Image (cartoon, grey):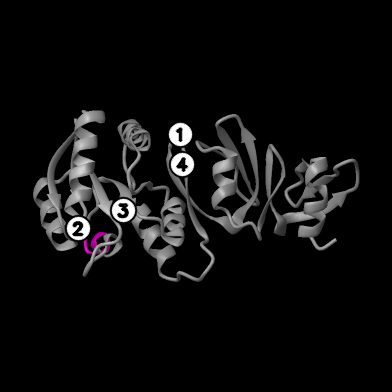
């Protein structure tokens, strides 16, 4: 069983989530519910849950502020939120799971199953990354948590040269580090990495435009990157790519 606490200022939201968990996620044992951040702090310290469902938008102390007030974060987190584009992007960069309200049953089941599969948690480091990324809402997010088979690794996106699709995984190539295998699809990375810096040249390749060494003309063409790798440009992406590099 996974012990859990639900934190949400809306009673209807807490009830709906509790009922969905009881019906569809029987492996979750809800120990308590909190209606605000202060109450949640006390309940977490008392119950020491393995998982918290944390609403972001709460009066007085929101979910992010509540996390900051905890010195130790020895639990998994699934955020629950109404749509907030910047907050969701920051959550994705820190590799946390989130559920949009009203909570979809299949998405809830998937999020809980992912928690079950995690051998350990790195919530403390993820939360620090999340706080860093939330400090400057108008600034480009740079720090990214990358899930691998060995756990989360943390990188600056400016160190990534090239991402390469490998079925449901992605090879990530760096300038001065060995490549890693991320347990996320290339499409998932494309959705969160900034389009002004990263460009999908081909269904298998996403490149950092800052690391292009030269473009070799052809049907679609080919790019030589600064690490010596060559990447194809698909015919349908050629015009868009040339525009992206100012040609």
**Residue 209 picture quarter:** bottom right
Measured Cα–Cα span from mark 1 to mark 4? 7 Å
Spatial CA distance of label 3 from label 2 is: 24 Å
Contact flag, marks 3 and 4 (Cβ < 8 Å): no
Judged by depth in the image, the label closer to the viewer, 1 or 2, is 2
Marks 3 and 1 sit apart, C-alpha to C-alpha, by: 19 Å
The image quarter in which residue 86 lies: bottom left
Residue 220 can be seen, yes or no: yes
Pick the front one: 192 or 181: 192
Foreground residue among 65 and 236 = 236
Residue 24 vs residue 207: left or right? left
Rendered image: mark on residue 9: 2
User: Badge 1, how many Cα within 10 Å: few under 14, some, many 20+?
Assistant: few
* Cα gap from disc 3 to disc 4, whole angstroms: 15 Å
Residue topped by disc 3: 124
Give the farthest residue toward the right: 218
User: Label 1: which residue?
Assistant: 149
Asked whether 106 or 228 is in front, the reply is: 106
- State the SS at label 2: loop
Residue on which disc 4 sits: 147
The part of the chain drawn in magenta is: 66-70
Label 1: which secondary element: loop
Q: Residue 112 — which label?
A: none
Element at badge 3?
Answer: helix
Whole-number angstrom distance, CA of label 4 to CA of label 2: 31 Å
Nearer the N terminus, badge 3 or badge 2?
2
Q: Is residue 136 magenta?
A: no
Mark nearer the N terminus (4 vs 2): 2
């Amino acid at each position: 069983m996974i012990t859990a606490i639900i934190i949400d200022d809306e009673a209807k939201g807490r009830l709906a989530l509790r009922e969905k968990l009881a019906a569809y996620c029987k492996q979750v044992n809800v120990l308590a519910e909190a209606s605000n951040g202060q109450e949640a702090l006390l309940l977490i310290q008392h119950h020491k849950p393995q998982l918290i469902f944390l609403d972001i938008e709460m009066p007085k102390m929101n979910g992010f502020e509540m996390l900051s007030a905890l010195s130790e974060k020895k639990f998994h987190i699934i955020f629950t939120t109404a749509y907030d584009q910047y907050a969701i992007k920051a959550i994705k960069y820190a590799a946390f799971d989130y559920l949009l309200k009203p909570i979809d049953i299949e998405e809830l089941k998937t999020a809980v199953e992912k928690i079950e599969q995690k051998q350990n948690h790195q919530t403390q480091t993820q939360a620090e990354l999340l706080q860093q990324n939330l400090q400057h809402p108008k600034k480009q997010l740079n720090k990214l948590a990358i899930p691998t088979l060995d756990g989360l690794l943390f990188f600056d996106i400016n160190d990534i040269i090239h991402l390469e699709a490998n079925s449901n995984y992605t090879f990530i190539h760096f300038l001065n580090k060995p490549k890693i295998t991320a347990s996320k699809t290339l499409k998932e990375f494309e959705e969160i990495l900034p389009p002004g810096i990263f460009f999908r040249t081909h269904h298998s390749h996403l490149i950092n435009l800052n690391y292009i060494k030269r473009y070799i003309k052809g049907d679609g063409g080919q790019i030589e990157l600064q690490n010596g790798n060559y990447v194809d440009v698909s015919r349908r992406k050629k015009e868009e790519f040339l525009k992206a590099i100012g040609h």
